[in-house]
């Protein structure tokens, strides 16, 4: 019953998280596009620094940007804030249900000397909070935008490297993503919104012409814009063990995130009227580098010469019984599993043969299965499975 409830909580929270994330990312991309598309109004308009004429859905729209307000506080203002909060809260709840509640399966690394579930949960909470604190201190301490951007990139890179040594590969990616998402939400609620409120107060008391409209808020919004795609990648990467299951998964994360940043920068230059296609090329090069780096170690060196007669099918059957069937059976015996993960049943040699390539990907090319190595599969056993698959996965 507990596992069934957890699965529905997982489904409900993930669906909510997707909805709120789409809303937040869509709003962020939309306003960044508008902001970079403004051009000086012709003829000039008082207090307006830029205008944008746009057509959509059968109508023409005119946007105007007032850096210090139109001379009064509009009666109704549309604030963009709840999208970020709802996305962060739903993501935090999803983290709690999937990775904290299921820490023994999804969070811990399973490596010798690794953290126990309770310690791993504590490390999870601590690193998320520390991520925001460190980032905020860096922003307040480094005046140069270029230097700050480089330092933040290094900070995130070191973080994902450290996470891969603390958590499982999948959880490491997720934590890099939620640290960046926490930075983004923190920027909105602790810097950008307070700055906007101070601006409105200055407009009301007539001191707006002397008011610093918020260079810090602007740079934080700039960071949020470039962090968006790496965060989205971190959220979907859990479905691709070829990335997080690799020994160099941390470097793959950096390369793929860098590709996202490069592509995002291309669109920013395009919206600003100075499109620079070379950034698309840079993104493609980084993505290709990640593809080469993360290539399975057996991709070119698989034991293609293994013969069916040389493989001990009985031993393979024993490995499947001991290491796979506890979870991947019609009725799993492993605690915490009500049904086989993803509906994959591997409780006989014949059924294992039909999933041979999946087994190769998650248990040989990578070691993401069994999760946290719960059933203690050895390297020797993985080698035997590799030989069995190379021989054509014989069943007798």
Image: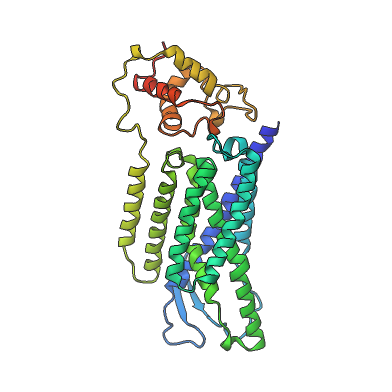
The residue that appears at 50% across and 83% down in the rendered structure is 48
Examine the image and state in which quarter residue 332 appears.
Answer: top right
Instruction: Using the image, determine if residue 50 lies above or below residue 256.
Output: below
Give the total of numbered labels: 0
Instruction: Using the image, determine if residue 60 lies above or below residue 341.
Output: below
Residue at far right of view: 1
Residue at far front of view: 113
Colour scheme of the rendered structure:
rainbow
Q: Is residue 147 visible?
A: yes
Instruction: Using the image, determine if residue 165 lies above or below residue 149.
Output: above
Which quarter of the rendering shows the C terminus?
Answer: top left
The residue that appears at 32% across and 28% down in the rendered structure is 302
Give the x, y percent position of residue 196: 61, 75
The residue that appears at 52% across and 30% down in the rendered structure is 370
Pick the front one: 98 or 275: 98
Drawn side of residue 150 relative to residue 332, left or right: left
Q: Is residue 94 visible?
A: no
Examine the image and state in which quarter residue 383 appears.
Answer: top left
Pick the front one: 48 or 125: 125
Give the x, y percent position of residue 349: 47, 16
Instruction: Using the image, determine if residue 70 lies above or below residue 226.
Output: below
Which quarter of the rendering shows the N terminus?
Answer: top right
Give the x, y percent position of residue 386: 39, 24
Give the x, y percent position of residue 295: 35, 39
């Amino acid at each position: 019953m507990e596992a069934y409830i957890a699965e529905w909580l997982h489904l409900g929270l993930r669906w909510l998280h997707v909805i709120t994330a789409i809303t937040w990312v869509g709003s962020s991309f939309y306003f960044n596009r508008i902001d970079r598309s403004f051009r000086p109004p012709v003829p000039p308009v008082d207090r307006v620094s830029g205008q944008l004429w746009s057509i959509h859905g059968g109508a023409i729209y005119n946007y105007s940007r007032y850096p210090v307000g139109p001379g009064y506080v509009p009666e109704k203002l549309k604030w963009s804030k709840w999208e970020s909060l709802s996305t962060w809260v739903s993501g935090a709840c999803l983290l709690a249900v999937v990775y904290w509640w299921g820490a023994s399966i999804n969070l811990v690394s399973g490596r010798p000397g690794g953290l126990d579930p309770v310690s791993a949960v504590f490390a999870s909470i601590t690193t998320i909070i520390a991520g925001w604190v460190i980032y905020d201190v860096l922003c307040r301490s480094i005046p140069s935008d270029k230097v700050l951007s480089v330092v933040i990139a290094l900070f995130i890179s070191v973080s994902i490297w450290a996470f891969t040594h603390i958590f499982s590969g999948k959880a490491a990616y997720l934590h890099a993503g939620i640290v960046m998402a926490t930075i983004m939400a923190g920027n909105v609620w602790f810097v950008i919104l307070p700055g906007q409120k101070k601006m409105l107060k200055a407009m009301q008391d007539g001191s707006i012409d002397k008011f610093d409209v918020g260079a810090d808020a602007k740079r934080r919004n700039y960071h949020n814009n470039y962090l968006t795609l790496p965060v989205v990648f971190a959220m979907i990467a859990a479905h691709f063990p070829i990335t997080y299951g690799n020994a160099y998964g941390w470097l793959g994360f950096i390369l793929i995130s860098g590709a996202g940043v490069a592509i995002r920068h291309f669109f920013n230059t395009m919206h600003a009227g100075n499109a620079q296609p070379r950034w698309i090329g840079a993104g493609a090069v980084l993505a290709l580098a990640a593809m080469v780096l993360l290539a399975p170690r057996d991709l070119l060196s698989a034991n293609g010469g293994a013969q069916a007669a040389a493989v001990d099918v009985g031993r393979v059957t024993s490995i499947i019984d001991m290491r796979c069937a506890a979870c991947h059976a019609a009725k799993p015996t492993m605690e915490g599993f009500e049904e086989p993960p993803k509906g994959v049943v591997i409780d006989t040699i014949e059924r294992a043969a039909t999933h041979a390539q999946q087994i190769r990907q998650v248990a040989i090319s990578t070691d993401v299965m069994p999760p946290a190595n719960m059933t203690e599969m050895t390297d020797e056993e993985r080698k035997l499975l590799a030989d069995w698959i190379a021989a054509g996965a014989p069943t007798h």
